[in-house]
Image (cartoon, rainbow, N blue to C red):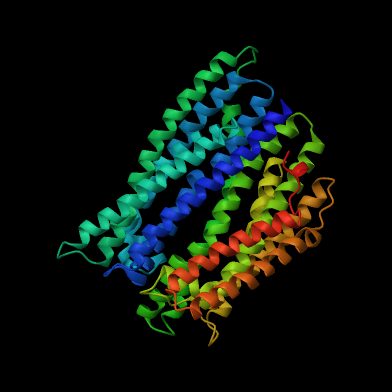
Amino acid sequence: MKKIEITDFFKGIISLVISQILIKIFGVIYSLYITNKNGFGDEGNAIYMSGYQIYALLLTISSIGVPNAISKIISEKKSIKDYTNLERIFKISVFVFAVIGFFGTVTLFIFSGFIAENILQIPETKLSLMVLSPAIFFVSISSVVRGYCNGENKIYVTAKSQFFEQIIKSVLTITLVEILSRFPNSNTEILAAIANFATTLATFCSLMYILKKYRKIKKQNIYLSKYNFPKERIFTIIRKVLIISIPMTTSAILTSLGKNVDSVTVVRILKNILGEETAIIKYGILSSKVDILIALPLSFNIAISTALIPEISRKKAINDISGIVKKIETSILITIIIGIPSTFGMCFYSEQIFDLLYPRANEGAILLSIASFSIIFSLLVQTINGILQGLGKNNVPVLASVIGLLVKIFSNIILIRVEGIYEKGAIIGNILSNIVSFIIVYIALIRNIDIKLNLLKKGIKPILASAIMIFFSLKIYNFLVLKNININICTISSIFFAILIYIFCCFFMKILKKNEIS
């Protein structure tokens, strides 16, 4: 039985990683389309992303911490075969968060004008916020269902639903923007709004899909129910769900607020220095190019933290301490294996990546190079947060996020005003914020469980492998350029070889051993 659980754990991680890769591919496709689309560009991205970040903040309140909280509770009930209360917890959670999501939808719709004009100071985002508002209700419900599936060790269901949602979002975004752009009265504001409307439609379709999958899992549990557990009171269940979900949600809110700090401070400060139009374009570069690319490794690594919470909760419920320690060590090592080459790649290939992805708007490569240094710290924070939440230490990620957010705010206010730095100040602030948050969660981890973690030792081989990867891949790139091959082919080829070289180095150096994944 233990072997099956471990196999399912890594199967869940692999399915989420694969889905995230596919999601990002489709995400890049529609992002490239709107960025290079006449009438959209960096200005349209500023409007689109400003609206989306406010939506993401309210979405976080109603849903982001919910899947992890629900998966933790469900996995604990499943470990003791309490299927009666497992289903009660799910149904009551759906009701509670549907209500919260409804109020989130109404709030965003009613106050869209106030948020656009007074908080973002980009009035054009009002329509985007209005069309996004129903998505909060849809995602509030689907997040509970995803948490249920994760707790049931059916993480692949979450992976499929997220991929399905992204396909619909990408296709609808391109289709609707292309159709609307052909009308003579269309403008950047309307195009940004219709792009955000595609998100709302996609979340609804994803909800329908995952509800269908839930019904199949529920039928299996009906046949498995052999133990009679006393039914927990509704108030007890609500209290338990909120006690676990509120800290997780708060931590996610604070992380989301970090991005909203940029949406507020960058435009507010720079418009008095560089002018409003330039300030909006600078923010558009940060939000729609740099942030999206830096988020790529995070989206892959989230598979680890998502799988860790129910897995560690399950092992804690049966007091399997050695199993917990093994999962922690392996997960952190995998995070380092993902983070180090991502940092190297984004840093040394920033210009090539921008020329490849944004040929008509390739400004901002230096920002990506600087921002790459935040990747490894943000990934480690993400993984350790999942570990701490699985252990029931939900308040530590909140504390780390609060302090990290304060560092981000003060850094932005001070550094963005410095001549010659400007928008780079927001990136430096993000790096400092991630470093501070990492120090806090790392100290909490080694204090709460008997584990010896030497991150420097774990990182030596991945750093060496990444250095070898960059050295040889750049040699290949320069060789291809000298042969007068198309520059985009040179970039794609060298990045492809970089991945192969890194994988080879990982196997050759035996960075991840068999006993660590079995």
Q: Nearer the viewer, residue 274 or 376?
A: 376
Where does residue 471 sit, x and y in percent of width and height? 65, 73
Q: How many marks?
A: 0
Identified at 51% across, 24% down, the residue is 217
Picture layout, residue 19 above or below residue 144: below
- In the image, residue 307 above or below residue 357: above
The picture quadrant where one finds residue 346 is bottom right
Image-based side of 224 in relation to 193, left or right: right
In this view, the residue farthest toward the bottom is: 419
Q: Is residue 307 visible?
A: yes
Q: Nearer the viewer, residue 318 or 453?
A: 453
Image point (85%, 46%), residue name: 450
From where the camera sits, is residue 367 visible?
no
Outermost residue to the front = 483
Q: Quadrant of residue 287?
A: bottom left
**Image-based side of 178 in relation to 248, left or right:** left
The location of residue 88, given as percent across then percent down, is: 54, 23
- Which percent across, then down, holds residue 331? 70, 48
Image quadrant holding the C terminus, namely: top right
Which residue is pictured at 69% across the width and 22% down the height?
Answer: 80
Image quarter (top left, top right, bottom left or bottom right) of the N terminus: top right
Residue 274: image x %, image y %?
41, 84
Q: Residue at x 72, y 53 (%)?
A: 333
